[in-house]
């Protein structure tokens, strides 16, 4: 008797859809035929607001057929639409399609009120563009589960400083109005026939505008705003470092510890609420590699370490080297790996995680990347105590010395 048909795997993972629920702007998960496979609460609320009974499928119809065809052809589309010709609301819609896949997504941003927050929207948009580029890199190594975690975590880390910088800008606008009003009082007094006669008027204006408080608060406000911008800049720079791809596929010397820290900063939002981090770094020489691919290995191992810790735990990062090789280890105090699973650990699609939390591809692809660099991944684990993954890489790729010698002999 032949077995019955197997149910097809869902187009979008539960982790990706869950990750979208943590952001406050509408996100929809679609297929190439514009069928909605998932939507977050913000998308349902927008559909309700527009009179569609909370059905997010109605939002998809805002994208014209010709533009959807361009999305399927080129992989991305962005445009500004209005729900109706007379509507005051304007929505900026971003659509993307995963390479060689029917998976499509739609993100919507209400841009009806521009004013003070316009610069924030533009900065966030540039960051979203960088995230989209990073996602295209990661689709080959972690599919949508890791991408959902990455995008949601980075968006959260960026939204916090952008939020208080925007609030500070509003306060600074009030302060500048008060200070300009006081300057005008001083100007009137200075150019009057009897400046001393205006002294009381100027003093009252100074007290009414609370200028002493403004002078005391202004440096703190500016310092806090600068820290927020620097924080966003650091995250964006880490994303840039993480997503950098050597198009010519030429291995060049790179700082692995810098790459590890940049990757850690990107995924830290997924770890910081339950992980205590320890770093035991030993200075490493520059290592010949493809940095973006090695960063993907670090990403997979860091996410796995975090997922192995259920409540609270520790992740220890360490490094070392000898004359030929360098190594970086990631140790977690999580649940550990059963002995019977160790031999299958790097097999494609093998996973010990619950359904919806892993594709079984992360370690397999990490193994392939490290093998491509003529290195290896060593694993030790004890159930209930945790696991250690050690990535060992040669400082110079095999054949480099021979190439140098040949060049010198010429």
Image (cartoon, helix red, strand yellow):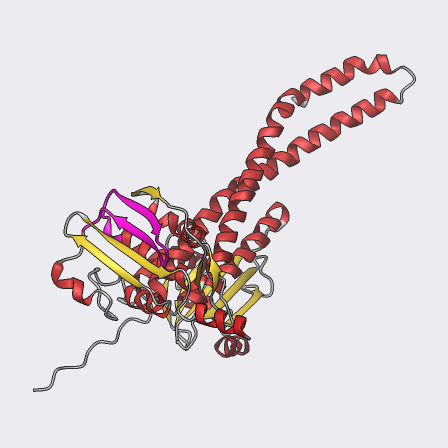
Residue 409 screen position, x and y as percent: 52, 73
Q: Residue sitting at 30 percent across and 66 percent down?
A: 367
Which portion, as a residue range, is magenta? 307-335
Residue 332 screen position, x and y as percent: 25, 48
Q: In the image, is residue 226 part of the stretch drawn in magenta?
A: no
Specify the quadrant that holds the C terminus.
bottom right
Q: Is residue 251 visible?
A: yes
Q: Residue furthest left?
A: 1
**Relative horizontal placement of residue 111, taking residue 357 as reference (left or right):** right
**Relative horizontal placement of residue 402, taking residue 221 as reference (left or right):** left
Number of labelled discs?
0
Q: Nearer the viewer, residue 58 or 102?
A: 102
The answer to whether 150 is drawn above or below residue 200 in the figure is below
Could you say which quadrant of the image residue 97 lies in?
bottom left
The answer to whether 127 is drawn above or below residue 8 in the figure is above
Q: Nearer the viewer, residue 24 or 373?
A: 373
Residue 60 screen position, x and y as percent: 46, 69
Specify the quadrant that holds the N terminus.
bottom left
Q: Nearer the viewer, residue 105 or 286?
A: 286
Q: In the image, is residue 334 part of the stretch drawn in magenta?
A: yes
The answer to whether 230 is drawn above or below residue 121 in the figure is above
Residue 48 screen position, x and y as percent: 43, 58
Q: Residue sitting at 50 percent across and 79 percent down?
A: 73
């Amino acid at each position: 008797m032949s077995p019955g048909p197997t149910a097809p795997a869902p187009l979008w993972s539960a982790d990706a859809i869950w990750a979208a629920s943590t952001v406050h702007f509408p996100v929809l998960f679609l297929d190439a035929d514009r069928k909605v496979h998932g939507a977050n609460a913000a998308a349902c609320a927008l559909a309700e607001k527009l009179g569609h009974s909370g059905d997010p499928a109605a939002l998809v119809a805002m994208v014209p057929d010709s533009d959807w065809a361009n999305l399927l052809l080129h992989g991305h589309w962005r445009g500004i639409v209005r729900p109706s010709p007379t509507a005051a609301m304007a929505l900026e819609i971003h659509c993307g399609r995963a390479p060689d896949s029917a998976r499509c997504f739609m993100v919507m941003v209400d841009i009806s009120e521009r004013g003070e927050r316009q610069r924030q929207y533009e900065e966030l948009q540039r960051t979203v563009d960088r995230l989209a580029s990073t996602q295209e890199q990661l689709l080959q190594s972690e599919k949508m589960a890791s991408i959902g975690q990455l995008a949601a975590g980075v968006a959260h880390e960026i939204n916090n400083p952008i939020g208080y910088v925007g609030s500070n800008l509003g306060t600074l606008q009030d302060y500048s109005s008060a200070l300009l009003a006081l300057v005008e009082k001083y100007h009137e007094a200075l150019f009057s026939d009897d400046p001393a006669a205006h002294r009381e008027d100027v003093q009252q204006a100074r007290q009414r505008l609370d200028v002493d408080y403004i002078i005391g608060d202004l440096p703190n406000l500016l310092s806090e705003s600068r820290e927020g911008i620097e924080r966003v800049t650091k995250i964006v720079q880490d994303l840039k470092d993480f997503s950098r791809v050597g198009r010519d596929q030429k291995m060049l010397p790179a700082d692995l510890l810098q790459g590890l820290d940049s990757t850690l900063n990107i995924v830290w939002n997924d770890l910081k609420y339950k992980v205590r981090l320890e770093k035991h770094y030993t200075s490493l020489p520059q290592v010949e590699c493809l940095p973006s691919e090695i960063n993907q290995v670090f990403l997979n191992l860091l996410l796995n370490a975090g997922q192995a810790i259920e409540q609270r735990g520790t992740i220890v990062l360490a490094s070392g080297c000898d004359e030929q090789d360098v190594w970086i280890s990631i140790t977690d105090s999580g649940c550990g790996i059963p002995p019977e699973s160790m031999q299958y650990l790097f097999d494609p699609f093998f996973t010990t995680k619950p359904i919806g939390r892993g594709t079984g591809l992360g370690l397999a692809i990490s193994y392939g990347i490290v093998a491509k660099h003529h290195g290896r991944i060593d694993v030790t684990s004890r159930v209930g105590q945790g696991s250690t993954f050690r990535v060992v890489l040669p400082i110079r790729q095999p054949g480099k010395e021979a190439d140098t010698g040949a060049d010198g002999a010429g």
